[in-house]
Amino acid sequence: MKSWHRVFVILIALSIVAPLASVHAANGLLKGTFKYKDPATGAERVLNSGFVYLRDASKPAPMEKFPSKADHILGPTMGAPFMISVPEGKYYLRLLERKTLGSVARPFGPPEEGDYTWVQRIPVTITAGGTLDLGTVYAAPFTYAAPITIKGTLKTTNGTLVKGHYVRAQTVPCTIDGEFGIVNQCGPDKFLAITPTDANGSFTLYLQNPGTYYLYTSPCLTADWTEYTGNNCGFTAGPTLTVSRGDVRTVNLVIWSYY
């Protein structure tokens, strides 16, 4: 082979290998064991047919009632532990195994009644060349009849029922920072579960996952500023609740009468 032919072949090979190497280098590993534990018997089984749903954390966080479109669907979660290559980045994460409907393969998509699912509400970070170990996570059967209910009324300090205010539950508290009390967006999942109060000042929030939730209310859908005179979008913090599956909790919220 002529020398210039050899050089040309080598350049072609490098042009193919280099992009592949750069793509591989930009990936990390997601590791974990995805299981279901039967609440009646305590028996555990590995969910080998699940998939990892990843949503870019720079986008709005998924809501409880309205699942958001995933940017990556990877898998399956085969093995204990599974190891899945994931593009580096920061993501909202869900593991999902579809329920079996005969021999018909079911398409990817948001969870449906009877599917097994586990959700990580706080974004996870995948680093290039690194490994994120979730450990063992336990799925819960998804149901449209949300297993956790938080309900109550919203009143002013003088006892007036308040209609049209938003009440929300989120997994991290709002934090105040800065000289002018700027709030750091009230966490990444402030729209996880949110609803307006009705004409009687009543509200009901539905949650899928047990855990600790922080309640807030505001006259505005987006309340990114702390409360101060003249700010009609200020928020009022309610109680912090730790809930389990099957809980129905009643909470009565109170805001200052100048609202």
Image (cartoon, rainbow, N blue to C red):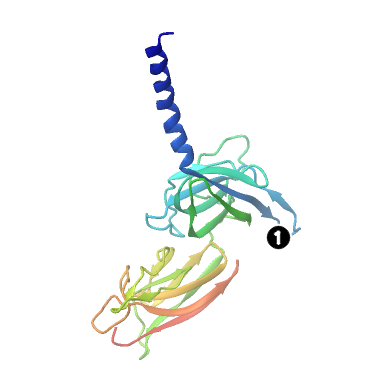
How many labels were placed on the picture?
A: 1
In the rendered structure, the answer to whether residue 219 lies left or right of residue 146 reads left
Question: Which residue is disc 1 drawn over?
Answer: 39
Asked if 155 appears above or below 8 in the picture, the reply is: below
Q: Quadrant of residue 221?
A: bottom left
Image x and y of residue 27, in percent:
49, 43
Residue at horizontal 39 percent and vertical 68 percent from the top: 195
Residue that extends furthest to the front in the rendered view of this protein: 3
Image x and y of residue 156, in percent:
36, 86
Residue that extends furthest to the top in the rendered view of this protein: 1
**Quadrant where the N terminus lies?**
top left
The answer to which of 143 and 133 lies nearer the viewer is 133
The answer to which of 28 and 141 lies nearer the viewer is 28
**Quadrant where the C terminus lies?**
bottom left
Image x and y of residue 21, in percent:
47, 34
Residue that extends furthest to the bottom in the rendered view of this protein: 158
Residue 139 visible somewhere in the drawing: no
Residue at horizontal 40 percent and vertical 26 percent from the top: 15
Q: Label 1 neighbourhood size at 10 Å, few (<14), some (14-19), many (20+)?
A: few
